[in-house]
Image (cartoon, rainbow, N blue to C red):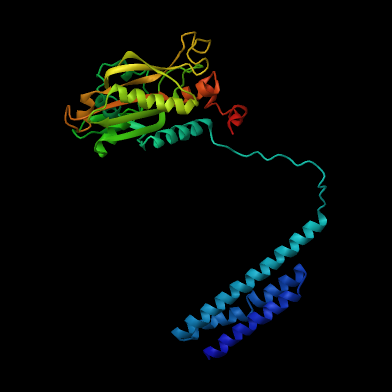
């Protein structure tokens, strides 16, 4: 019984393929589809009869019948597509001498390109890429970084505080906020990694401040952290000079000025020699020969303690800068709001 049905399925497949080769119209193909795959077709009758077969017969007959049905259906559908395509080609006439219309192709956003370029330079120097949450607790964003409770940065004019509240380990209510800087990611990284290490953390930050040509409420930064036994300011100067010279494609000098950051001691503001005039003085650098880039310093030992390290066991330097600021310097852009403004005329310049 099983052998006869299997043989019948093979015969039906052969007949269907032979009929398909001779068919060249859509109406004939539809009739062919009804004959071999319709509700009253022999394939459907065979499948309906499976319920009366033994388990082995069901398995063998059902498998072959279904496979054959799929093959026939696919070949009929392909033939229908080919005929329709041929008919459309015959109806449609194209003047190949007419100029074609340009297709608009998307491209990577300028900030994403800058970020990948920065990451590539640091990776070539042996750095790892770190990451962290954009929504932080007050402890990670301020307290762990040695920012005093009465520091102005905690006030509403600098920080977007969220309404959501989260219970801390002591049962109190811990405030949440979109991170105002990338320094809290240093704490996250140090809590899960053992020194020595070199890491960079790129990401988006948020500040509650008015926007103008040089300020945005949402922008991108890049944080660098190096921790080891004998890390010094000289190490920072070498890494920074190597990076900026590579990024701008020319030899640049680094200048440090005394500064203050709660999470570093000593702290510095640092400048690079003007990328336009090479340090001679021009309108871009206000005739000083220097361009302000960011802040840096030796990691405060209290920050190490808050990350779970023993005091005076490790040394390190940290520094950060804005990616928009670097893009503005490199491509002579005079308004930071252009990066997030969505103006395609601006964005298409950087394909």
Q: Position of residue 75 (x, y in %)?
A: 66, 70
Residue farthest to the front, as pictured: 251
Q: Position of residue 50 (x, y in %)?
A: 51, 82
Say which of 240 and 350 sits in front: 240
Give the side of residue 348 with respect to residue 143, left or right. Answer: right
Give the number of marks.
0
Q: Quadrant of residue 323?
A: top left
- Identify whether 97 is placed above or below 71: above
Q: Is residue 56 visible?
A: yes
Give the side of residue 202 with respect to residue 44, left or right. Answer: left
The quarter in which the C terminus is drawn is top right
Say which of 135 and 103 sits in front: 103
Q: Position of residue 183 (x, y in %)?
A: 32, 27
Q: Position of residue 13 (x, y in %)?
A: 64, 80
- Identify whether 118 is placed above or below 333: below
- At x 21%, y 25%, the residue is 301
Q: Is residue 219 visible?
A: no
Residue farthest to the top, as pictured: 287
- At x 59%, y 81%, the residue is 45
- At x 53%, y 19%, the residue is 335
- At x 68%, y 74%, the residue is 34
Say which of 96 and 43 sits in front: 96
Q: Quadrant of residue 102?
A: top right
Say which of 88 and 191 sits in front: 191
């Amino acid at each position: 019984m099983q052998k006869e049905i299997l043989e019948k399925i093979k015969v039906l497949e052969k007949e269907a393929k032979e009929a398909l080769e001779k068919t060249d119209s859509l109406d004939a193909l539809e009739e062919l589809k009804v004959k071999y795959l319709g509700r009253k077709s022999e394939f459907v009758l065979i499948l309906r009869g499976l319920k009366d077969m033994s388990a082995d017969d069901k398995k063998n007959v059902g498998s072959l019948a279904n496979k054959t049905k799929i093959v026939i259906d696919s070949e009929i559908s392909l033939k229908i597509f080919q005929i329709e395509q041929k008919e459309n080609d015959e109806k449609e006439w194209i003047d190949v001498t007419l100029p074609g219309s340009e297709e608009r192709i998307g491209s990577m956003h300028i900030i994403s390109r800058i970020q990948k370029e920065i990451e590539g330079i640091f990776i070539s120097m042996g750095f790892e890429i770190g990451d962290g949450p954009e929504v932080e607790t007050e402890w990670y964003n301020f307290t762990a970084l040695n920012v005093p409770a009465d520091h102005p940065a905690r006030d509403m004019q600098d920080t977007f505080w969220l309404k959501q509240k989260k219970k801390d380990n002591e049962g109190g209510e811990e405030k949440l906020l979109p991170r105002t800087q990338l320094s809290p990611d240093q704490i996250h990284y140090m809590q899960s990694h053992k020194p020595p290490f070199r890491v960079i953390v790129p990401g988006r930050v948020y500040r509650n401040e008015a926007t103008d040509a040089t300020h945005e409420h949402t922008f991108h930064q890049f944080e660098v952290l190096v921790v080891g036994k004998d890390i010094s300011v000289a190490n920072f100067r070498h890494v920074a000079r190597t990076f900026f010279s590579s990024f701008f494609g020319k030899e640049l000098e680094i200048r440090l000025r005394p500064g203050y950051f709660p999470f570093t001691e000593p702290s510095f503001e640092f400048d690079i020699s003007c990328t336009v005039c090479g340090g001679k003085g021009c309108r871009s650098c206000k005739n000083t020969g220097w361009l302000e880039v960011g802040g840096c310093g030796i990691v405060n030992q209290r920050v190490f303690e808050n990350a779970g390290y023993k005091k005076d066991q490790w040394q390190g330097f940290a520094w950060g800068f804005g990616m928009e600021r670097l893009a503005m310097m490199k491509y002579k852009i005079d308004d930071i709001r252009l990066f997030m403004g969505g103006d395609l005329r601006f964005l298409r310049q950087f394909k």
